[in-house]
Image (cartoon, rainbow, N blue to C red):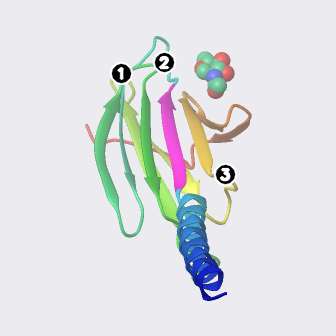
Amino acid sequence: MAVPSTITFKFSILLIILFSFEARETIAISLTEKVTITNNVTDPTPKTITFNCKSKDDDLGVHTLMFGEIYRFSFRPKILYPIVHPTVFSCSFTWLGNPHRHYFDIYDQSRDRCFHCNWKINLNGGCLNGDKCRPWKSVQLMDA
Ligand SMILES: *[C@@H]1O[C@H](CO)[C@@H](O)[C@H](O)[C@H]1NC(C)=O
């Protein structure tokens, strides 16, 4: 009698441990947002773009992408006060032969509902996951 119940008890503990790992894994995956930026800028020939993306807390640094190349980043958006202080990553894009700095919000927690936000950056702005296109948020002439 005592033996089976001990085994059952140990087995229950094992199941609880396994389930809690499972739960933690699921939460970690669902909280990570993945963003990709693909260079599709033709102006009027394919261009290499230089860009910098920042949120209030993170500066992702300056990167360059040749035409067709992809840059990836992932992050954990805020869970506590997303409505008051949504996570926003704003990027500025430049390329040789164009005197403007092009601004674009590559991720806005209050706007975007995507765990995999794949943006194509075009001459006129960006297209999300192959369909939703947005113009540049603003365009500024750079100093000479
Ligand atoms: C890529 O750029 C070309 C030329 O501007 C445009 O016709 C095409 O729609 C763009 N592709 C996407 C997926 O935005």
Residue 23 seen in this snapshot:
yes
In front: 31, or 84? Answer: 31
Q: Looking at the picture, how far across and down is residue 143, in whole percent?
A: 28, 42
Mark 1 falls on what kind of element? loop
Alpha carbons under labels 3 and 2: distance apart: 29 Å
Residue bearing mark 1: 97
Q: Looking at the picture, how far across and down is residue 121, in whole percent?
A: 54, 32
Q: Amino acid at mark 1?
A: Gly
Q: Quadrant of the N terminus?
A: bottom right
Alpha carbons under labels 1 and 3: distance apart: 33 Å
Mark nearer the N terminus (1 vs 3)? 1
Badge nearest the viewer, 3 or 2: 3
- Crowding at dot 1, Cα within 10 Å, few <14 / some 14-19 / many 20+, comes out as few
Residue in the image at 60% along x and 62% along y: 26
Residue bearing mark 2: 43
Number of labels in the image equals 3
Q: Identify the disc placed on residue 141.
A: none
Give the magenta range: 33-39
Mark 2 falls on what kind of element? loop
Look at the numbered discs 2 and 1 and tell me whether their residues touch, using CB distance below 8 Å. Answer: yes
Horizontal side of residue 1 vs 32, given as left or right: right
Q: Looking at the picture, how far across and down is residue 117, in whole percent?
A: 60, 45
Residue 86 seen in this snapshot:
no
Residue in the image at 50% along x and 39% along y: 36
Q: Amino acid at mark 3?
A: Cys
Look at the numbered discs 1 and 3 and tell me whether their residues touch, using CB distance below 8 Å. Answer: no
Ligand 1 quadrant in view: top right
Residue bearing mark 3: 114
Residue in the image at 40% along x and 69% along y: 56
Mark 3 falls on what kind of element? loop
